Amino acid sequence: MIAVGEQAPDFTLRDQDGEKVSLSDFRGRKLMLVFYPGDFSPVCSDQLSIYQEVRPEIAEKGVELVGISVDSSFAHKAFQEKLGIDTVLLSDFEPKGEVARAYGSYIDKVGIANRTLVLVDEDGVVAWTYESPNPGEFPGANVIFDALA
Amino acid sequence: MTDLSSAPIPPVGPDDHVADGGEEGLIVYADLGCPHCAGEWGRLRERPGRLVFRHFPVASKHPRSPALHAAAEAAGNQGAFFAMVDSLYADRGRVDDPHLWQRVERLGFDLERFEADRRAAATQTRIRRDFESGIRAGVAGTPALFDACTLQSVREREF
């Protein structure tokens, strides 16, 4: 896992609409990167749906939030529509998981990112991280608010 | 500014929705639009001990949920909270407004009052209060269960 105080590795990934998004686009603002294993969870426990419900409160804290997984832009678009969310989802698709690896979130043996939260500050420095004990455990939104307190 | 940082769930209070008696039991944070909750509801209702219902509507995923939670709250004002919840979970395919009115008629309470109550600001505030307490306790999916005495999280397979 990337350490607090390190410069957050820059990246350019495509979002759910195929548009390029770079970490440097967020310079001057706080950004919460939400690494997650994959689109389409089988049960009613989608982390990103819960975060959507508290987006106004997250925005009040001056933080933007984006999701990242190894899925394609097309899958992200469908997932976004299924969940009814407007959170930007970035596609860490090719080379697969390259950004997750750079942040120390990638799990090689299963080929997905763990559920990891990384707060990047206005200067592009890692300010806080959270890593789930395993991909099946969801960090609740309270964890985000603890970090922003 | 709303504080959504970590906090234990609140203890059972006088305005909680409580089914059956006794001290021991479960507090459930549930979404009335969630099929997984509907699937578990029968088992939760049959379980001995009290059952405390707290609202946890995830509107992005289940767009009808806010209206259903408001309907349950309005039914609760006429003493029929759990009757409405039971009815909504038992028939998930009929949850539009005319279906809600039919339920009101069947349950025998005042439609005019129901309509006013489900749209009242106090109803939204009450629902959001439950939702925020769930967020603060780390609820990340529904149904989320807690022991009514210890307020500790209970894993699904343990209840």
Image: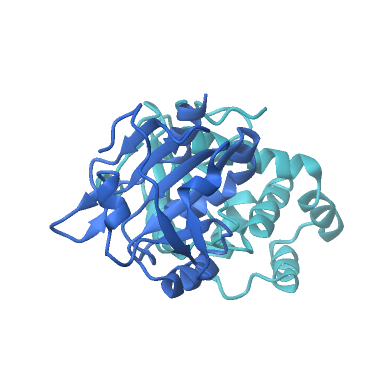
Chain colours: A blue, B cyan
Quarter that holds the N terminus of chain A? top left
Q: Residue at x 81, y 46 (%)?
A: B120
Of A109 and A136, which appears nearest the observer?
A109
Horizontal side of residue A118 vs B20, given as left or right: left
Residue A132 appears anywhere in the view: yes
Of all residues, the one furthest to the left in this rendering is A109
Q: Is residue B38 above or below residue A131?
A: below
Q: Position of residue A98 (x, y in %)?
A: 28, 56
Horizontal side of residue A120 vs B125, given as left or right: left
Q: Position of residue B67 (x, y in %)?
A: 69, 58
Q: Residue at x 65, y 35 (%)?
A: A60
Q: Position of residue B89 (x, y in %)?
A: 52, 63
**Number of callouts:** 0
Horizontal side of residue A5 vs B12, given as left or right: left
- Image-quadrant location for residue B17: top right
Q: Residue at x 20, y 61 (%)?
A: A111
Q: Position of residue A35 (x, y in %)?
A: 36, 50
- Image-quadrant location for residue A62: top right
Q: Residue at x 34, y 36 (%)?
A: A130
Residue B49 appears anywhere in the view: no
Horizontal side of residue A15 vs A41, given as left or right: right
